[in-house]
Image (tube, rainbow, N blue to C red):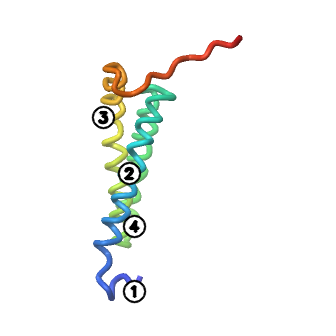
Amino acid sequence: MQFIENYNLTGFIIGLFTFVIIGLFHPLVVKGEYYFGTKCWWVFLLLGITGLTGTFLFQNKILSALCSVTAFSAFWGIGELFEQKKRVEKGWFPKRTKNKRR
C-alpha cells in the first residue's frame, strides 16, 4: 500500500478496477436474463447490499471504493435486467428456448 500512496496510484487503481467491474456486470446481466429471466434480480440486490456493507466496514480507501463500485453496479444491474428483457422482446438479443427431451 505504501507503494500505491508514494506514487499516487490510488485513483488509477480505482479507475482500472471500476472498468473491470462494470465490464463484468454487462455479461452477468445478459446471461442472467438469458438463463433465469428477471427472477434473478434478488441476486443483484444481495450483491449490492453486501457491497454497500463492505463500503462502510473497510477503512482502506481503495477497498471501500471498490465495494461501493461493485454495490452500485449491482443495483444498476437490477434495472438493466428488466431493460434486457425488453431488448430480448424486441429481438435485439436471442431468446432462450426450452429444449424438449426427445
Name the mark nearer the viewer: 2 or 1: 2
- For the residues marked 2 and 1, what is the alpha-carbon distance in whole angstroms? 27 Å
Are dots 2 and 3 in contact, CB under 8 Å?
A: no
Task: Give residue 79's mark.
Answer: 3
Sequence order check: which comes first, mark 4 or mark 3?
4
Tell me which amino acid carries mark 4. Answer: Leu
- For the residues marked 1 and 4, what is the alpha-carbon distance in whole angstroms? 16 Å
Name the mark nearer the viewer: 4 or 2: 2
- For the residues marked 1 and 3, what is the alpha-carbon distance in whole angstroms? 38 Å
Task: Give residue 47's mark.
Answer: none
Sequence order check: which comes first, mark 2 or mark 3?
2
Are dots 4 and 2 in contact, CB under 8 Å?
A: no
Q: Residues within 10 Å of mark 4 (few under 14, many from 20)?
A: some
Compared with 23, 11 (above or below) is below
Q: Which residue is mark 1?
A: 3
Q: Which residue is mark 2?
A: 23
Q: Residues within 10 Å of mark 2 (few under 14, many from 20)?
A: few
- For the residues marked 4 and 3, what is the alpha-carbon distance in whole angstroms? 25 Å
The answer to which quarter of the image holds residue 95 is top left
Residue at 38 percent of width and 47 percent of height: 48
Q: Which residue is mark 4?
A: 63
- For the residues marked 4 and 2, what is the alpha-carbon distance in whole angstroms? 18 Å
